[in-house]
Amino acid sequence: MEHAQHIIESTQEIFSSMIMLDVTPGEPYHRKNEMLNDSISGIIGLAGNTKGMLAIHLPTQVALSVTTAFLGMEVEEVDDDVRDAIGELANMLGGNLKAHLDPKGSEIQLSMPSTVSGEEYMIDCIADAQEITVPFTLEGNQFLVELQLSPE
């Protein structure tokens, strides 16, 4: 749970300053092996002194709303614009996390963002990971930001 507050602050800052939307955090929890339904996930890998993964999981309708606000243009289906926007959100969150975990900026490298979407899928990247998930509410809908770190 030690990284939950940083996830909350980073997510609120990025949503309010880059997307002009307010999000409300919920109670952090451990999401292990929970299916994602009708969603899209933006994922960033961490390598170097800290290994892990940061992901943002958005139900499709939330992802469409976020992308519409982010790009300033109406989107109605998960397409390349939505995948790019959600990947960029993950990238911004990963950059904030890297600055928090690696103040010198030389001990952690971030992967290129990737996205996964579908009707039903699971993301479980690291065996025995230290994991924390923070739920957020946006306009009455929920999305998740998840951090998995490899045990030392």
Image (cartoon, grey):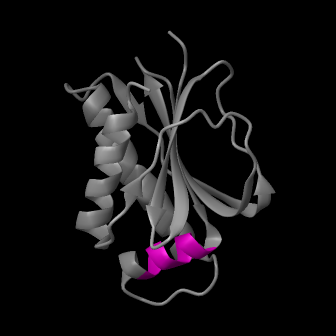
Q: Which residues are magenta?
A: 61-68
Residue furthest bottom in the image: 74
**Going 28% across and 46% down the picture, which residue do you hit?**
9
Give the vertical position of 105 relative to 11 (above or below): above
Residue furthest right in the image: 120
Figure label count? 0
Residue 4 rendering spot, x and y as whole percentages? 39, 35
Q: Nearer the viewer, residue 145 or 140?
A: 140
The answer to which quarter of the image holds residue 128 is top right
Residue 90 rendering spot, x and y as whole percentages? 45, 52
Quadrant of the snapshot with the N terminus: top left
Q: Nearer the viewer, residue 103 or 35?
A: 35
**Going 73% across and 42% down the picture, which residue do you hit?**
34
Find out whether residue 63 is within the magenta segment: yes
Find out whether residue 29 is within the magenta segment: no
Left/right placement of residue 49 relative to residue 42 reads left
Left/right placement of residue 151 relative to residue 91 reads right
Give the vertical position of 111 relative to 37 (above or below): above
**Going 47% across and 42% down the picture, which residue do you hit?**
27
Residue furthest top in the image: 152
Q: Nearer the viewer, residue 146 or 141?
A: 141
Magenta span main SS: helix
The answer to which quarter of the image holds residue 124 is top right
Residue 31 rendering spot, x and y as whole percentages? 63, 37
Residue 133 rendering spot, x and y as whole percentages? 53, 39
